[in-house]
Amino acid sequence: MRLRTMSGIKLSNLLLCGWSGLVLIYLYLPILLLVVYSFNDSRMSVVWEGFTFKWYGQLFDELVAHLGDERRSPLIESLSNSVIIAAITTAFSVVLGTAGAFLLYRYRFPALRSITALIFIPMIIPEIIMGISLLIFFKTVELELGFTTVIISHVTFCFPFVLIAVQARLAGLDPSLEEAALDLGATPLKAFFLIMVPYLLPAIISGALMSFTLSMDELIVTYFTRGPKSETLPIKVFGMAKVGLNPMLNTISTVFIVATAMLVVFAESLKGTARRLPDES
Amino acid sequence: MDVMVELRAVTKRFGSFHAVSEVDLQIKAGEFITLLGPSGCGKTTLLRMISGFETPTSGAVLLDGKDVTHEPPYRRDVNQVFQSYALFPHMTVQENISFGLRMKKVPKQELAERVRAAVAMVSLGGMEERKPSQLSGGQRQRVALARAIVCRPKVLLLDEPLSALDAKLRHAMQVELKQLQKKLGITFVFVTHDQEEALTMSDRIAVINKGRIEQLGDASQIYHRPKTTFVASFIGQANILRATVLSRSGERARVRLDGDIELLVNAEHLAGGAESALISIRPEKIALRKERHGDLENCFEAHVEDELFKGATDQLRLRTDSGLALTAVVANESSVQAALHAGDRVFCHLHPDDIVIVHEE
């Protein structure tokens, strides 16, 4: 027998909605609190004293002052470091990931499965182990810690995301597509750039956005591999939080959350296109 | 006539598997030739060696007199229509069709002209700005065709291009393709496993089995004069029977089947001095009568074991008194008296030219 409420909605549906709501609250309430407190008119951030845009104004002032070379703002500097590191990391990840996926697709060899599995290790290994091992490595090869070492570290765990996205798209590829281009007079190089790259583009972009966000968010590995001048935003925020909860922290975190969320949503929507496209060909 | 494509002792091995063995084939300019065979027989590999996607292990491929054995696909004057069509999904119909001309750096004006002509030829007017995903199966097929012929290749290679279409559209496209080939005068090399398609469209058919050409000839030769048991049973239906050779005189030979049935047969493919042979009889060539008719040459008695209604025809299973089983196909008779039923005794009449000596595979 089906249980129905007065309005005719099935009871099971109602229960499901309730459960989903609880899960969402559990996931997002802490984040929501952080966002709310970024509008709190108080120096002590855990006591609510009224609504204000003050902290956002202050953040904006710091940004203007920093960009206008009036006053050096460590917070804004760390943000710009993060963006530079994430951008360069993404560029390398895209090239490595796309080339890697293409090679794994094109050449079949006995160790293929083991190599594919090895690529995933940087994605699942605890970050602290990753950080320590990279630090030992950089010390061994006597590489000075700084931007270079942070970027190298970030690329190691970012490029597998591009590789996986491109690999998934390649799995749905009609092998005749490239042959058709060659048959019509395109050299292998032209066929790659005129046919393969446009075909893989949604996957490449989605992988690139993933690696950009991952690099922006990363704390632990960066903590071990950074130099004195390569402080990233998460490191800076972590340092500030140790001294005391500053409302500015909430503000910059909110900006950060919104930016990251937008990138992730965009990446996911592209993944959707990437999955749909093969059926259309 | 000029030879457009020539295969000289072409062999292709994949590891220890012989996909194609020692194939010699001359394709004439302007000819519609079909490579017909079951899946895995090597017909597609043969095609891919002409297009350049496979390099022969040994032997040579000549295109218009020039050795192209080691030329890559993009330097060969041939184009292919792929089984999956392989249209570029991110390009419009117009961009797909003009791709080959853009690669060849054809001047803008000529390019536009030729694309327009190709679009008109395959009746795709008004579809130029659509993406492949917005087209039906038949329309995609036309785009694939236009994309290849717009390049004016010396040879057009078609790899089972009709297999993804439904039966009705497939029949329409068969006729259309044949007309297009006549109009363009381009050499067509068509690969299929569908014997009906091959018989309908081709000037010549190469029947391929296990990497070798079993028989090369026009549709009528292939159908009426199969050389091997494989050709006889792959194209249409055939009754294959073992016979003892009694005597031979010119075009005719006298053979005996089990049960003392003596038949006069066509001896074209009979090896000299052979004592026994296999004969092939097409089911529709057996004329069945309820009474003995005319002379007694090439006539034997049998009874109908069962009948299968096939619409336009009836398929009958016959058994002779000595136990030989035969299949016969007769026009579906609507009059009750004339119709044959299980248990009826019949006389089977055969013309000597409808009994062909075939070799074992």
Image (tube, helix red, strand yellow):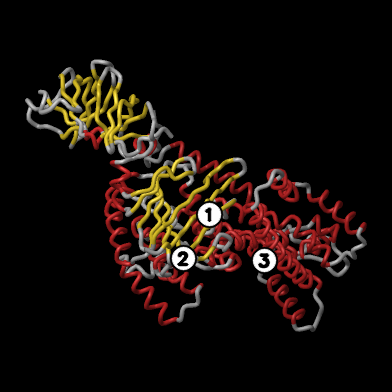
Q: Residue at x 27, y 28 (%)?
A: B254
Left or right: A132 in relation to A191: right
Q: Are marks 2 and 1 on the same chain?
A: no
Q: Camera-side residue: B62 or A31?
A: B62
User: Residue under mark 2: which chain is it in?
Assistant: B
Amino acid type, label 2? Asp
Residue under circle 2? Answer: B64
Disc assigned to residue A175: 1
> Does residue B297 sit above or below A96 in this rendering?
above
- In this image, B168 relative to B77: left or right? left
Labels 2 and 1 touching (C-beta < 8 A):
no
Q: Which-is-in-front pick, marks 1 and 3?
A: 1
Front residue of B52/B336: it is B52
Label 3: which secondary element:
helix
Answer few, some or many: residues within 10 Å of disc 1's Cα (few below 14, many 20 plus, some between 14 and 19): few
x, y percent for residue A51: 65, 66
* Label at residue A255: 3
Q: Secondary structure at mark 2?
A: loop
Residue B130 drawn at (x, y percent): 38, 66
Residue B139 lies, with reference to residue B298, above or below; the image says below
